[in-house]
Amino acid sequence: CDYWALGATVFQMISGQPPFRAVNDFHLMNKIQKLDFSFPAEFPDVPKDFVSKLLHICI
């Protein structure tokens, strides 16, 4: 979904890392399906809600 991709891109642009990281593709897909991600402590509060909604929109 394009909105989900936008959320993942914005997350990475702000934090410098992807929202989902895993040791292999299987674990990565599981994390994406379970929405297993967290915001770094330095992530600004204003875009947190926006990014979170985008990452949840297509799951």
Image (cartoon, grey):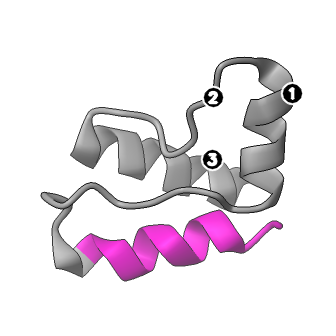
Residue 32 x/y as whole percent: 74, 49
Q: Residue at left 83%, top 55%?
A: 33
Q: Is residue 1 visible?
A: no
Q: Which amino acid type is shown beneath numbered disc 1? A: Phe
Q: In whole angstroms, how far apart are the C-alphas of marks 2 and 1?
A: 8 Å
Q: Which mark is residue 26?
A: 1
Residue type highlighted by circle 3: Ala
Asked which quadrant contains residue 43, the reply is bottom left
Give the numbered dot on residue 22.
2
Residue type highlighted by circle 2: Ala
Find the magenta span and give its range. 47-59
Q: CA distance from mark 3 to mark 2?
A: 18 Å
Q: Is residue 50 above or below residue 35?
A: below
The majority secondary structure of the magenta stretch comes to helix
Q: Position of residue 57 (x, y in %)?
A: 72, 74
In what element is the residue under mark 2? loop
Percent from the top left, x then y, of residue 47? 29, 72
Quadrant of the rendering where the N terminus is positioned? bottom right
Q: Which mark is nearer the camera, 3 or 1? A: 1
Q: Return the residue at label 3.
A: 5
